[in-house]
Image (cartoon, rainbow, N blue to C red):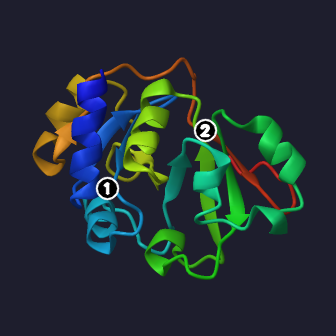
Amino acid sequence: MSSQIERAAKVIKKGGVVAYPTEYCFGLGCDPLNESAVRRILKIKARSEKQGVILIAANTAQVEQFADLNAAPQLANIKASWPGAVTWILPARSDVPAFIKGEHPSVAMRVTDHKVAAALCHAVGSAIVSTSANRHAMPELCSAQAVTEELGSEVDFVVQAAVGGATRASEIRDGVSGANLR
């Protein structure tokens, strides 16, 4: 598996787009600071750039590259839920580009507990984009084979590994109010 992670990390570092397993389904990932790669994912998904994208991280240090955790009143709940399949809407650092945030002053992030996804973040050395591997409003793709069949020509590499045991997409919560948004 380490060769798969290394190859995916190289693709991401060179500005490419990869598909990789997460807790529930496959995600599309790239370097969140590479605008052309993020825009490429949005095009693959036929998703509006106004929405922003979710980022996953291997640890809170990677989250802090993009979010101001100290400005999140729900910090204790956030830390208690990580690593895990809970995405939090967090106050974004001032230098986070609009192509990540969309039309929001915040950034959606989680520390993943999926071993392959976390290893990929470690190998890249940063949080990565994690939006479900599917076209907008279509069912999520939950296997490497399904991703290859549906999106194979549009991504640069598909990690051959299994998704986790989650039965639904990650919960999304507001880091300020604590409200459950999904």
Q: Position of residue 2 (x, y in %)?
A: 30, 25
Q: Position of residue 52 (x, y in %)?
A: 50, 67
Compared to 116, does 65 lie above or below?
Answer: below
Q: Position of residue 150 (x, y in %)?
A: 19, 38
Compared to 34, does 182 lie above or below?
Answer: above
Please, what secondary structure does the residue beneath circle 1 have? helix
- The residue drawn where x is 19% and y is 40% is 157
Label total for image:
2
Where the N terminus falls, by quadrant? top left
Circle 2 sits on which residue?
A: 170
Depth check, front residue: 45 or 34:
34
Circle 1 sits on which residue?
A: 45
- The residue drawn where x is 46% and y is 41% is 122
Amino acid type, residue under disc 2 in the picture: Ser
- The residue drawn where x is 89% and y is 61% is 73
Q: Quadrant of residue 117?
A: top left
Residue 147 shown left or right of residue 88 in the figure: left
- The residue drawn where x is 52% and y is 54% is 55
Q: Earlier in the sequence, mark 1 or mark 2?
A: 1
